[in-house]
Amino acid sequence: MEKLRLLRETIKLNGLDACIIPMTDPHMGEYVSDYWKIIQWLSSFSGSAATIVVTQEFAGLWTDSRYFIQAERQLKGSGIELMKLKVPHTPEYIDWICENIETGSVIGFNSEVVSVGLFRQLKEKLEPSGVKLKETSDLTQELWADRKELPCSQVYDHTVFFAGLDRDEKIGKIRESMREKGVNYHLLPALDDIAWTFNIRASDVQYSPLAISFVLISETNSLLFVDQDRISMELRKNLLESGVEILPYGQIYSTLTSLNSRARVYLSAASVNAQLYNSIPEECTIVEGISIPTMLKSIKSGKEIAHIKNAMIRDGVALTKFYYWLENNLASGELNEISVSEKLEEFRAEQDYFMGPSFATIAGYREHGAIVHYEATAETDIPLATEGIFLLDSGGQYLDGTTDITRTISLGNPTVKQKRDFTLVLKGTIQLAMCVFPEGTRGYQIELLARKALWNHGLNYGHGTGHGVGYFLNVHEGPQNIGSSASGSNEIALQAGMLISDEPGLYREGEYGIRTENLVVVKEIQETEFGKFLGFETVSLCYIDQSLIEPGLLEKTEIDWINFYHKKVFEALSPFLDEDIGKWLGEKTKEMIID
């Protein structure tokens, strides 16, 4: 409450009636550094998607159904009210402002953390209502006494052995596309675009191997705005040989301001902040679209896919060892959500090329499994027992790939209801995995397959069904998706080489949550007189708990898929397991035979 009171005083001192605080940074990334976690500092809410609006009389936090339960708990005592989004990733707070803020009011926002696209939405909706928008500096700057510094980890080379293409080839592809678009500059603020383009990685952002930086690519050179001290002499030399000039991080704004009036600049309104956009001289021509690296890196090369499959084997070995360990230690009564999460990371750390988790592990036992993005803390942690449902959503960052997988297992005595729910969710995972579709299909056009079994029983889930995944980059990466997703666009067709998740779920508040998630690669199936047809290859490798399956709810094709998948899992992982664990996995993946 005290933080909110001080913020309200600051709002008033700045001649404002309200302010908007998004959960972003100047690069519009999903995961932001501690320096930019303003919402968490103000409200204690630690989810990855939210917006706060503060007036003198009201403060509200808008977030989606993934975080409803979590937000209700974390907002207690903050003076901030939970505002539940009806549709994920929609700025419904704008409608609230239109309906509740008086004509003539002035609303402030920090243009460094508001995208051009969002700024336009604000302007379009609020100005007709007589509400004025005012760009401000960060209003919390003077209030946040123990604010951390911007991170400055060492930038390192992601070698061509893993990357597949060297940076010269990637820059060349970008320039080729720039010529096709008739532009001579490409502004890149998105950290994953920069990392992919220059084959560089760092650890500035939790869970994603990124370096806080900006890039401006021209027809003849590339400007990388990053603190030079973070780059070794050898890497600096290699970058310079590729025509990459290194400039101070904050110099991006003055560089844009000095562009020639004839410059034609290509950018993405979704990833460029309003301050960057406003720094470009009005005389310049701005061309907008999805950033070129975003499209290029969404389609994994043959080398990248081969690396990803190797990473999946090692990740599957770690998961198998973990579940074997869990089953053999559960009766001790000493395991809890946090300790098992830490143990899983230990098993992953034993694998070659492991660099850390790709997101905060979701280890949800019993009712915690119903909190879609639950992260156990010292206050919420509960012990595991030999009964109930346990949902584990986790992933690893490897030099040769990024993983993301969810398994739901029974710790003992599954109920009829739990088995039915689990099987209906599994049917969705399988039906989507088996899908064949014509080239040009968008993800939302096939999402029905993942939800149909649930819908038939009056059940549903509130999150998207699939998100793109990076290559030793962000675990959520656009532009592709299946259903609503913060990291993708419904307008992008699925293309061969794209890596995407397949993750329907079901959540019963206060009881349990169920999700079965695999990563799949889009591949060509066949070409006929009706065109090309695509499908999915499941690349995640981990057994599915057959004790939770109700066979009577499955079709023969679905049972065949389970048997084929389990055979693949066993053959891929067993050569890397000790004899005892190999036999155990053989039991877990034994063929389902239905009379």
Image (spheres, rainbow, N blue to C red):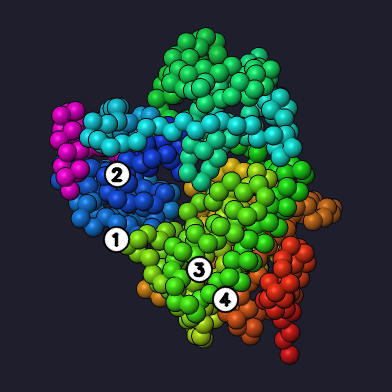
Is residue 559 shown to the viewer in this render?
Answer: no
Which of pointers 2 and 3 lies earlier in the amino acid sequence? 2
Q: Residue at x 74, y 84 (%)?
A: 593
Dot 4 or dot 2: first in sequence order is: 2
Q: Distance between the residues labelled 3 and 1?
A: 20 Å
Amino acid type, callout 1? Arg
Is residue 579 left or right of 239 when viewed as pictured? right
Q: Which image quarter: residue 136?
A: top left
Q: Which of 122 and 505 is in front in this view?
A: 505
The crowd level at tag 1 (other Cα within 10 Å; few <14, some 14-19, many 20+) is few
Q: Residue at x 67, y 25 (%)?
A: 171
In what element is the residue under mark 2?
helix
Residue picked out by circle 4: 328
Query: Which residue is disc 1 drawn over?
Result: 73
User: Which label sits on residue 391?
Assistant: 3
Q: Mark 2 — residue? A: 41
As shown in the figure, which amino acid type bears the numbered disc 3?
A: Leu
Residue 68 inside the magenta-drawn segment: no
Q: Earlier in the sequence, mark 3 or mark 1?
A: 1
The answer to whether residue 144 of the structure is visible from this angle is yes
Highlighted magenta segment, given as a residue range:
1-21
Q: Which of 585 and 561 is in front in this view?
A: 585
Based on the picture, tell me whether residue 19 belongs to the magenta stretch. yes
